[in-house]
Structure formats: C-alpha cells, structure tokens
Amino acid sequence: MLISLDDIDRKIIAALQSDAKLTVNALADRVGLSASPCARRVRQLEKSGVIKGYAAIVDQKKVGLPVSAFASVKLERQREDALERFAKAVARWPEVVDCYLMTGQRDYLLRVVVRDIEAYEEFLNTKLTRLEGVSSIETSFALKQIKRSEVLPEV
C-alpha cells in the first residue's frame, strides 16, 4: 500500500537515511519542526512501515567476509508451494543477505556473503544444492563493489 508523504515526511526520511543516529532535536532542526511534532512524525513513519528499522552498515571486508557471490537459481517448478519452500529455506541462511524473486529465465537471484571461495562451495554443497526443487544454479563472483547504498532516490 502506497503511503501519502508530505514534504516534511520526505525531509525526515532523507535525513534519517543519511544519518539514522540523529537525535530528535537535530532532526527537528534539519526539517524545520520542533522536537515533539518531529518525534510524532517519526513514530508515525515507523508505525506505518515506511521506516522499517535502523541498522549499522558494516564493512564486510573488515569483518572477514570479502566475497560476494551472486547465485542465479532456477527451480524445477514455479508452483506456489515450491516458491514458499525456497523462500523459507533462504530466510534461515545467514550467508544470503539479499534474495529476489525474478522475471526471466531464472527464478531467484541471491547475494551470498562468505569469507572465501571454499566457504561458498560449502554453502552450495550443504544448503543450496540440497534444497528440494532446485533445478540449476549459476554463480558469478563480484570482483569489486562500485556502489552500494541503502538510500532510496527521492521519495
């Protein structure tokens, strides 16, 4: 469901996307409100699901997980039960940081973050290839990350 946002809501979202650690007072100053109405708007944006949460953005290389593998997965069938089974399994695997149901020749695109190629091979052998209904998997490895952002274009 599309949520109706006014200019102040958009300013709040933009400010929090660039710095989620802003205090209510600092945020209020940025968007031109006093603290109480600003806090109410933030709570409403959270309650409506526009703001889904807050998280620290961690450098995957600095924590020993430099490899991003993109696995394109084709299922044997695209029936609802097969799609649900796949989605539930992927949701349990911490190595999968992004998963998209796709159009085209492949059904899913996964971004898998691991320490090295051997760890990816283990992920394939112990999890992905053992999942019932998987027909084929094609993997590409990222050589270098050019851009990554959690900031949406203007809302």
Image (cartoon, rainbow, N blue to C red):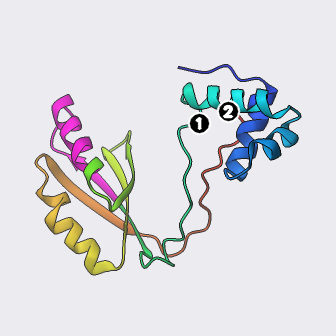
What's drawn in magenta, residue-wise?
A: 71-90
Tag 2 near tag 1, CB within 8 Å: yes
**For residue 42, which numbered disc appears in the image?**
2
Tell whether position 76 is magenta. Answer: yes
Q: Residues within 10 Å of mark 2 (few under 14, many from 20)?
A: many
Determine the secondary structure under disc 1. Answer: loop
Nearest to the observer: residue 124 or residue 13: 13
| Residue that mark 1 sits on | 51
Spot occupied by residue 3 in the image (x, y as percentages of width and height): 62, 21
The reply, left or right, for residue 141 in relation to residue 153 is left
Q: Residues within 10 Å of mark 1 (few under 14, many from 20)?
A: some
Spot occupied by residue 32 in the image (x, y as percentages of width and height): 89, 34
Work out how far the residue at label 2 is from the one at label 1, CA to CA, in angstroms: 8 Å
Determine the secondary structure under disc 2. Answer: helix
Q: Residue at x 27, y 52 (%)?
A: 73
Residue 134 drawn above or below residue 113: above
The reply, left or right, for residue 149 in relation to residue 66 is right
